[in-house]
Amino acid sequence: MNHRSGSGSEVRAAQSVAQVAAMIAIIALLTWAMDRLLPVNATTAGFAYLVAILFGATRWGLLEATIGSVVAVLCFNFYFLPPVGTFTIEDPQNWVALVALLVTSITASRLSTRVRRQAIEAQERQQELERLYALSRSILLIDSAQSVPRQVVNQVAQTFDAASVLLYDHTTGDMYRAGREEFSGTEEQLRQAASQGTQLHEPGERMWITAVRLGTQPVGALGISGVVLSDSAVQSLTNLVAIGLERARAQESASRAEAARQSDELKSTLLDAIAHEFKTPLTTIKASTTALLSDKPPKPEQQREYIVLVDEEADRLSGLVSEAIQMARIEAGQVRLQLEETTVPELLESVLAKLKTTLDDRQVKIDTSADLPPVMIDREMMEMTFRQLLDNAVKYSPPGSPITILVSAANGQVVTRVQDQGRGIATAEMPRIFEKFFRAKDTRNQVPGAGLGLAIARAVVTAHGGTIWAESKPGEGSSFCVSLADASHITEGAA
């Protein structure tokens, strides 16, 4: 910080010397012109010097104008007051003229400098107001999906064109940086400012460290350098930053509340859906067991039918419970992928083997491209995904109709399409088919299910960094497509 301070002082000193030299040069040039090129009397010379000094006061400042006034008085005495060519003054009236020129020049310079300073300050205040207004708008438009404090500190640096900005969040203990240079203060200074509610600003330095308060309570500290700010602008700036930090707190609290609300809503909807879906298989199981346990047992062939019904409905109940558990795990963010390298055809063979009873008499045709690359997947989770898609194809297509699975590779992706010959999906319902608990109007009372299968499939594919979508035309069947990156395109960070 001291090194930067010395450099700034040296620059200002050099600039001041250059301006004083320019003022003296103007007086010298004016003297030469009035003495050699266009001889004038003493009165005209005095007015000319006064105009030149007023110009210097307006252009640079009081110091340059005062030095110019002294030089002008000396030149006026030497070149225009008799005896010319000496600094001697014989006529007392010339003393009056000389003093009058000096006093008038200095007084006019002070007035001109004051007006100039007031104009500059007014312009600076106007710029500060414009920047504060722009910052307030930027904070209101901050994207809540990203880090709010990081966006706030970036907006402060951009809006005020600051060399560096450092924001300390007292609640989390995090530091956020922005700007083209390293901040000249220290992190410890910001922590002290936040804990003690103090402000640090060295006169003449373009660096501030100030507490950020929300009401009377410090919530952080802001450090900004490389920009000139008034005390009122710094206070307004910290108030805006405090609003930004409070907005982050409010959004975080709202997100937690919304997550809790959605969790409760999920539990309630899940229980309602499961209770509804459990009724049919439980009714069937109860009726079958009642018949088997009756005083007049059914014939052996009928007993087998009842037992098969109980077994099928028990599998159906097991599937519903598994879907509910998986959906709850996904919603809670408890899914951890165990990736391993495998091929999609190999995965599909395993899925079809486990769905042999469900597929029954369905013909399932698998058409794969040659030299398919392997993929990095969690086998258990991805098998569940394809089971959902195949089960979906069975439910929503005519009995006995074939199901086709196409697997191809292009542009580093392995794409699998599960095609059925069902009635298709209505255009209005396409955007919602992957939503939890969504069931199509014309099939919700005809096809069993809780509306979780496709939602689970989407969550699993998304967790793998893949994409899932549906292609369908009413009356022409549907295709559910899954795109996964091949193993060679999975980076270590992505995996």
Image (spheres, rainbow, N blue to C red):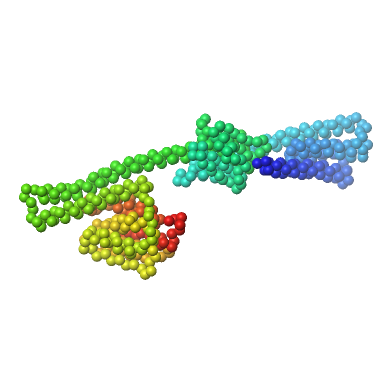
Residue 214 screen position, x and y as percent: 51, 33
Question: Residue at point 63% right, 35% down?
Answer: 201
Rendered-image quadrant of the N terminus: top right
Judge from the rendering whether residue 192 lies leftward or rightward of residue 355; answer left or right: right
Q: Residue farthest to the left?
A: 296
Residue 444 visible to an observer of this rendering: no
Question: Residue at point 38% right, 59% down?
Answer: 340
Question: Residue at point 92% right, 40% down?
Answer: 85
**Splitting the image into 4 quarters, where does residue 100 fall?**
top right
Judge from the rendering whether residue 40 lies leftward or rightward of residue 239; answer left or right: right
Residue 485 screen position, x and y as percent: 41, 60
Residue 379 screen position, x and y as percent: 34, 58
Residue 354 visible to an observer of this rendering: yes
**Splitting the image into 4 quarters, where does residue 176 fall?**
top right
Judge from the rendering whether residue 310 lies leftward or rightward of residue 201; answer left or right: left
Question: Residue at point 20% right, 52% down?
Answer: 313
Judge from the rendering whether residue 68 lies leftward or rightward of residue 194; answer left or right: right
Rendered-image quadrant of the C terminus: bottom left
Q: Residue farthest to the bottom?
A: 370
